[in-house]
Amino acid sequence: MKQNKMAVMPMGKLLFTMAVPLMLSLLVQSLYNIVDSIFVARLSEDALTATSLVYAVQFLMIAVAVGTSVGLNALLSQRVGAGKAEEACHAATTGLVLTLATAAIFSLVGLFFSQPIAALMTDDETLQELCIQYMEICVVLCYGTFLQTYGQRLLQSVGDTVLSMCSLIIGAVVNIILDPIMIFGLLGCPAMGIRGAAIATVIGQCLGAVAALGFNRWKNPTVHVKFRGFRWSWQDVAAIYRVGMPTIVMQAIGSIMTFAVNAVLIGVSSTAVAFFGVYYKLQNFLMMPMNGLGQAAIPVVGYNYGAGNGERIRQAWKIVIPTGVIFALIGTAIFLIFPEQLLLLFSASDEMLAMGVPALRIISLTFVCATLTIICGYFASGLGNGVINMLGGALRQLVLLVPLVWLLTSFLGIDYTWYAMWVSELAAVLYSVTATRRELRNKVDPLMQRAAD
């Protein structure tokens, strides 16, 4: 039943059982990023600013890991749905080789280029040193990030989001426990400051990766890595990156956006950079339920598209859209009502509060638009089209946002910077909804017509 529940379980129940574990796992993942920042903020605002700057590099690394795994997830779900289990195993092995290769590239970048990257981020020597200390650990030892993401997607491709969640929770809990011990030197451990935060993160990611790969080895009923008789397939690579590359680009856009916006804000003050880093992590935390819902749709849509069941795809569409809007409205309410309390979690200074409270309220009004853009992108990815995801992300995070942030900050001041998000999010949602509806008409409606005939 585990390998075919996506074909027979009532759609509402299916999405609920798959999305809730994903939501919880993403919330936990986002939570330990927030906990890192909370503890680092207690060191100094400079330390918080440094981690906010390095987050652009981490985001790029995560973009490649997630994008490759999303492409693999869509391919595996379609092959499992079409009853091609052996081909799915072959694709999983190809995906593992790609995962290890990309992790090795990032590791080498962290080993040899941490110092020049830090110099690009800031002219402040103190901030540069803190950035280097954090990068040399998190980026060089990035294998846990890549393998954990890979293992989770293999589980999700057959509908097992519970074990995927468990692997992430294991890594997150370890990280949260180790953070104060390694940062401040508790229980006999030496105080390592910002390096301690990086080491705690790496240990948590590695243990999460071990758990995810172990769950696949013993609990995945269909998809397994098989090196015996394995032959490299460029066709599989192309299929993975047909969906995965647009997702990588979309995720990388977040890294470029963070880097570019930080470059604008550092001209205002380091507090502005620290606030933007805090906001981005808070926003990611509150958007995780919507991301979980969208990610749950990928294997559901991919499986039923591979099986030729258009009716179930339409059912999923009618459920995920209104559900996502409800979650977005809840997030909006939290930002509107509790902005000061959210910032105080990060030991916000009076300057950060004066800047951040109105900013969070302005930004929160874009959450519904952002949610619809994200869900449409994931839904289209399940149908094998990752371009909609990429272009939607580009519109909301780069093409319009960065120039508008520069213009508003330069000519009107920091108080008006955040209105840039209103324009970019509105343009992105108009494109994404229109393009995804067209994809449904072109790919899903013909399946339904054939079934009716």
Image: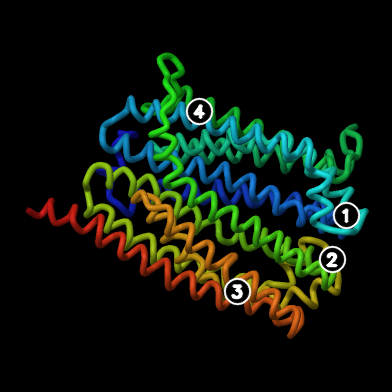
* In the displayed structure image, the side of residue 167 where residue 237 appears, left or right: left
Q: Earlier in the sequence, mark 2 or mark 1?
A: 1
Question: Which amino acid, mark 4?
Answer: Phe
Dot 2: within a 10 Å radius of its alpha carbon, few (fewer than 14), some, or many (20 or more) residues?
many
Asked if labels 1 and 2 touch by Cβ distance under 8 angstroms, the answer is yes
| Inter-mark Cα distance, 3 to 4 | 40 Å
Question: Which of the two discs, 3 and 4, sits closer to the camera?
Answer: 3
Question: Which amino acid, mark 3?
Answer: Met
Q: Kindly identify which residue carries mark 4.
A: 215
Q: Kindly identify which residue carries mark 2.
A: 270
| Inter-mark Cα distance, 2 to 4 | 43 Å
Dot 3: within a 10 Å radius of its alpha carbon, few (fewer than 14), some, or many (20 or more) residues?
many
* Nearer-the-camera pick, 409 or 353: 409
Q: Kindly identify which residue carries mark 3.
A: 421
Residue 306: image location, x then y, percent: 27, 42
Q: Earlier in the sequence, mark 3 or mark 2?
A: 2
